[in-house]
């Protein structure tokens, strides 16, 4: 890619002064107060349903013919299957309705009979839970492409045959998997976070509109610093924004007059404010309280811009990008329950925009760059949904897609087709009466880029390799961990099944690029100095993979003879929690902000403590035996407790930190090794 060289402008110097949240008067005017700080699948075939009547056979004599009687046998099939004359398994909902995605309704009598059957049955298995249709996966077009290992024969005929777990664990077949612990005293409605305050404070008047939101933007110099911090810290882990296109729109916005800015795209303003909020969270100064206040204000401004945009009945790539980032902000701000609910909105909007469909099918005439951005945005939505549901033990939602992972190819990423496309301004599959369809906007060529607007081809290839790896891992995790855990079903129904799942995870891990699987801390230190972007990606992939492998190794199913492999679970947990320790050593301030990383490390340490408290370091003769794995695991828990002490310096809820430490300390004291 050949770019015209432009004169490099001097970068602004951040002097420790950040504008605090402005106060608005009744007219929507604002003023800034500065503060300073120091650095520190297919349905059933149709089959006729023959309904027999109770009428008497007729004779030639019409007088002897009796009218047909109405049958007294109630209809137990759903109304949709009766209407379509298809086979109904009478589940709630039935499998036929699930596959054709129709409304499954039963008569009152059918529901009454089904309810009585459930009460009179001694078997308490989940009889009316149906297995969702499998995801449609497009075969790879490349012989060298790596495909996600999926267990096609998992040993279960139907989901009804899976034995429910009996465990203290929220996800659990195993007493080792204790994740739903009382982190803190909270009301029943506040499920995941601490504190019941609304995440978006209301600074806004009723009639202010978008001009009011724009009036409280930071200065251009401060905005540049916050955007640069976003691309330094957040973009490496979640690289779904096209940097040059964003910067082109960003610089164009700041070159507008104040009156012209008030007519800007509200979704783009929301995206900017979401990036400001995340950038502020990762600033090393000023104090945490001041950073938190400013970041929350920026997120409130992003929410207000989305309200002006009317995000509930219209959408765009920019709006979904903004909402995706706001979900991560809410997690870091200790509002995981709000983040989960918020993510449900932008996931529905992603479905409405058909991001879950192969762009070559739904937007075949779009430029290559736009197709690639659609794939990357869906991957980001899918990734967030899958791994958040692993932590929260809730059902995954991004389960229907035909976007092939291999389509996120290097040649698509490096293509020049589409550099003049207005990315994110509208959807190509929206309402046919939309003004963007009737009168499409003309796209202007991008302005010559500044040096920091350009991503070199090597970094672009590395990012795509990381995204493909995470996508393959997400496919495996969603089907084999997220879905069963959300229903408290065992992860494996037989020892052979468990071994096959573990082998699938390990095969996938070996297919990842070497720079993403390096575990040596010394080499990671060199990587962090030379290529910090790749180091961050390594740590996030390592943490996610080994956390999921740990859960699988520790799972058990007593009824089917599946036992927990304590030693292997401890080894996986060690690598997982050490990914957090490495992040703490290489990027300490960032480790204090990432809620997802902190929560995984806490769960891993807690699992280690429970494994050690339920295990014995003795052989069959009762003679004490030494195994360094157990001692190393105990040291991991002790080190996590030390870090949780120092974590108070960087942020997050102090109540959450204290509750986590108290729970982990109690578990640590029960260790007998």
Image (spheres, rainbow, N blue to C red):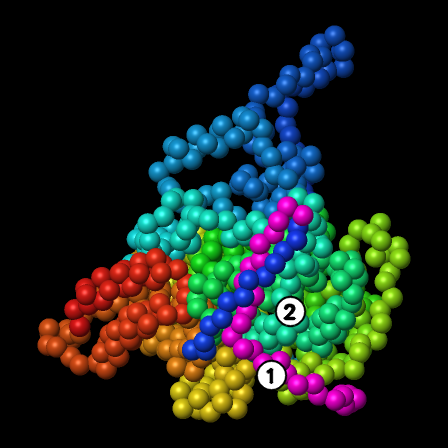
Magenta stretch: dominant secondary structure: loop
Height in image: 433 above or below 390?
above
Q: Quadrant of residue 566?
A: bottom left
**Whole-percent x and y of residue 408?**
67, 75
State the residue position of label 2: 219
**Whole-percent x and y of residue 362?**
77, 62
Q: Residues within 10 Å of mark 1 (few under 14, many from 20)?
A: some
**Whole-percent x and y of residue 139?**
66, 71
Q: CA distance from mark 1 to mark 2?
A: 33 Å
Q: Mark 1 vs mark 2: which is more N-terminal?
A: 2
Tell me which segment is drawn in magenta.
Answer: 1-27
Q: Is residue 191 visible?
A: yes
Q: Which of 125/375 is in front?
A: 375
> For the point 78% across and 67% down, which residue is it?
256
State the residue position of label 1: 462
Q: Nearer the viewer, mark 1 or mark 2?
A: 2
Q: Quadrant of residue 257?
A: bottom right
The kind of secondary structure element at disc 2 is loop
Q: Residues within 10 Å of mark 2 (few under 14, many from 20)?
A: few
């Amino acid at each position: 890619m050949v770019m015209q060289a432009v004169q490099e402008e001097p970068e602004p110097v951040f002097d420790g002064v950040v504008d605090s949240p402005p106060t608005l008067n009744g007219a929507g005017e604002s003023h800034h107060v500065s503060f300073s700080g120091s650095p520190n699948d297919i349905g059933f075939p149709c089959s006729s349903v023959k309904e027999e009547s109770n009428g008497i056979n007729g004779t030639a004599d019409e007088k002897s013919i009796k009218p047909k009687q109405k049958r007294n046998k109630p209809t137990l099939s759903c109304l949709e299957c009766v209407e379509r004359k298809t086979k109904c398994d009478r589940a709630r909902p039935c499998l036929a309705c699930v596959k054709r995605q129709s409304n499954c309704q039963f008569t009152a009598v059918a529901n009454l009979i089904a309810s009585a059957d459930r009460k009179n049955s001694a078997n308490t298995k989940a009889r009316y839970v149906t297995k969702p249709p499998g995801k449609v996966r497009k075969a790879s077009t490349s012989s060298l492409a790596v495909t996600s290992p999926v267990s096609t024969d998992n040993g279960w005929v139907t989901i009804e045959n899976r034995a429910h777990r009996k465990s203290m664990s929220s996800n659990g077949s195993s007493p080792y998997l204790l994740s739903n612990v009382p982190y803190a005293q909270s009301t029943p409605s506040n499920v995941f976070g601490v504190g019941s305050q609304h995440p978006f404070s209301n600074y806004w008047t009723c009639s202010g509109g978008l001009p009011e939101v724009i009036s409280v933007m930071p200065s251009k110099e401060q905005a540049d610093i916050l955007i640069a911090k976003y691309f330094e810290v957040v973009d490496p882990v979640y690289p779904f924004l096209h940097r040059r296109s964003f910067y082109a729109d960003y610089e164009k916005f700041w070159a507008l007059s104040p009156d012209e800015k008030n007519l800007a795209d509200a979704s783009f303003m929301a995206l900017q404010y979401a990036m400001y909020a995340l950038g502020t969270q990762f600033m090393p100064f000023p104090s945490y309280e001041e950073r938190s206040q400013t970041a929350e204000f920026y997120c409130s401004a992003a929410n207000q811009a989305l309200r002006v945009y009317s995000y509930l009945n219209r959408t765009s790539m920019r709006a979904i990008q903004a909402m995706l980032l706001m979900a991560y902000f809410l997690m870091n701000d200790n509002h995981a329950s709000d983040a989960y609910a918020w993510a449900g909105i932008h996931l529905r909007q992603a479905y409405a925009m058909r991001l879950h469909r192969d762009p070559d099918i739904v937007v075949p005439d779009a430029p290559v760059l736009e197709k690639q951005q659609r794939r990357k945005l869906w991957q980001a939505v899918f990734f967030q949904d899958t791994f958040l549901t692993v932590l929260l033990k809730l059902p995954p939602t991004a389960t229907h897609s035909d976007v092939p992972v291999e389509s996120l190819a290097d040649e698509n990423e490096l293509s020049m087709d589409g550099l003049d496309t207005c990315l994110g301004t509208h959807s190509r599959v929206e309402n046919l009466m939309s003004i963007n369809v009737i009168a499409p906007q003309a796209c202007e060529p991008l302005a010559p880029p500044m040096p920091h607007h350009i991503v070199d081809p090597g970094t672009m290839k590395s990012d795509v390799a990381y995204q493909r790896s995470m996508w393959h891992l997400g496919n495996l995790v969603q089907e084999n961990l997220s879905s069963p855990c959300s229903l408290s079903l065992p992860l494996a129904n037989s020892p052979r099944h468990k071994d096959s799942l573990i082998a699938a995870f390990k095969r996938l891990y070996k297919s990842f690029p070497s720079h993403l699987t390096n575990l040596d801390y010394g080499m990671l230190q060199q990587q962090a100095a030379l290529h910090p972007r790749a180091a961050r990606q390594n740590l996030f992939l390592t943490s996610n993979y080994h956390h999921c492998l740990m859960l699988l190794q520790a799972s058990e199913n007593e009824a089917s003879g599946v036992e927990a492999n304590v030693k292997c679970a401890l080894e996986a947990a060690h690598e997982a929690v050490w990914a957090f320790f490495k992040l703490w050593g290489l990027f300490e301030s960032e480790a204090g902000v990432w809620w997802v990383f902190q929560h995984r490390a806490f769960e891993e340490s807690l699992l280690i403590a429970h494994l050690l408290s339920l295990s014995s370091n003795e052989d069959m003769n009762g003679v004490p035996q030494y195994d360094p794995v157990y001692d190393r695991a105990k040291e991991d828990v002790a080190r996590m407790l030390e870090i949780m002490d120092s974590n108070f310096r960087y942020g997050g809820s102090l109540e959450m930190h204290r509750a986590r430490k108290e729970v982990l300390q109690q578990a640590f004291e029960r260790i007998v090794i």
